[in-house]
Image (spheres, helix red, strand yellow):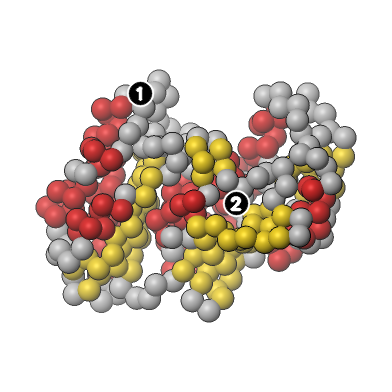
Amino acid sequence: MIRLKDHLFPTTAKEAAEMLSGLGGRGRILAGGSDLVEKLREGHSDIDVFVDIRRIEDMKSIALHGDDIVIGGAVTHAQVAASGLIKREANVLAEACHSVGGPQIRNLGTLAGNIVSAQPAADGSLALTALGASLTVIGHGYERQIGIANAFAGPGVSKIDATKEVLTRITIPINGERRGSSYQRLAMRRSLSLPMVAAAAVVRLEKNRFERVRLAVGPMAPTPLLVSEIDDLLWGKSVSHGNISKAVEILGMVAQPRDSLLRGSRDYRLSMVQVLACKAIMAASMKARRQE
């Protein structure tokens, strides 16, 4: 049974941070609640109070600010998946958020919650890692910026302190034309919340040659894994299945999946991550090529 002492409703992110600060580590932000409620059901007795941010309107929007897409900390997976702006400028994120759980989870769960839960195979986190997103976090009396790659400390451990900080905004830079992206995912069944293997790719081309490739894969390390070596291996090369297949072989050295009864053996997932990475880069390249 879930037992709480209070359920608070701040009207601003600053107020939410002040409330958390005054709760001595026993309060948690509630936005979607899909992960938080599960923790309570598992018997986490250190949570007494929900600080509910669902009434903070400026945290529920997706907007274009200059050359950046800004996503509020209370935006759901369903909102991201349906956003015309996201589909046009950062489609890998729309595809990833559409892959999360079932319709009920997507309608309730938030992209920010996906980040704070810090799972190395979280769909939204993988896509944001490939996109080079940054995060705005506030606490009582301060605000700080975190690059998405620096937001995770380990499996289930975020560098955002859920007992006293609020993730208010997710910012995605838009890097001009000739860019495409793709998300590829393998799961035992469609409704499985986390994939066995997943790959997110963002590609930039110049005259059918790779100018930039950002590939993020999971769960291949304790945190979402950005494979920077792929960018080095493909830079300046023409778009071809052979070049991509050769480059993704590096995953056999840099990825470190574990054997898992749920997600398959280490060897199987090492093989499949190369297949999905190749598919993601090729699909992203085809989208970028249409912009040339």
Q: Position of residue 247 (x, y in %)?
A: 18, 50
Q: Position of residue 194 (x, y in %)?
A: 47, 36
Q: Is residue 263 visible?
A: yes
- Mark number displayed over residue 161: none
Image quarter where the C terminus lies is bottom left
Which of the two residues, 25 or 34, is positioned nearer the viewer here? 25
Q: Residue at x 42, y 24 (%)?
A: 262
Q: Secondary structure at mark 1?
A: loop
Q: Identity of the amino acid at label 1? A: Asp
Mark 1 sits on what residue?
259
- Seen in the picture, residue 91 relative to 112 is either above or below; the reply is below
Image quarter where the N terminus lies is top right
Q: Going from the N terminus, do you reach mark 2 or mark 1 first?
A: 2
Q: Is residue 83 visible?
A: no
Mark 2 sits on what residue?
112
Which of the two residues, 223 or 276, is positioned nearer the viewer here? 223
Which of the two residues, 85 or 166, is positioned nearer the viewer here? 166
> How busy is the neighbourhood of tag 1: few (under 14 within 10 Å), some, or many (20 plus)?
few
- Seen in the picture, residue 225 relative to 56 is either above or below; the reply is above
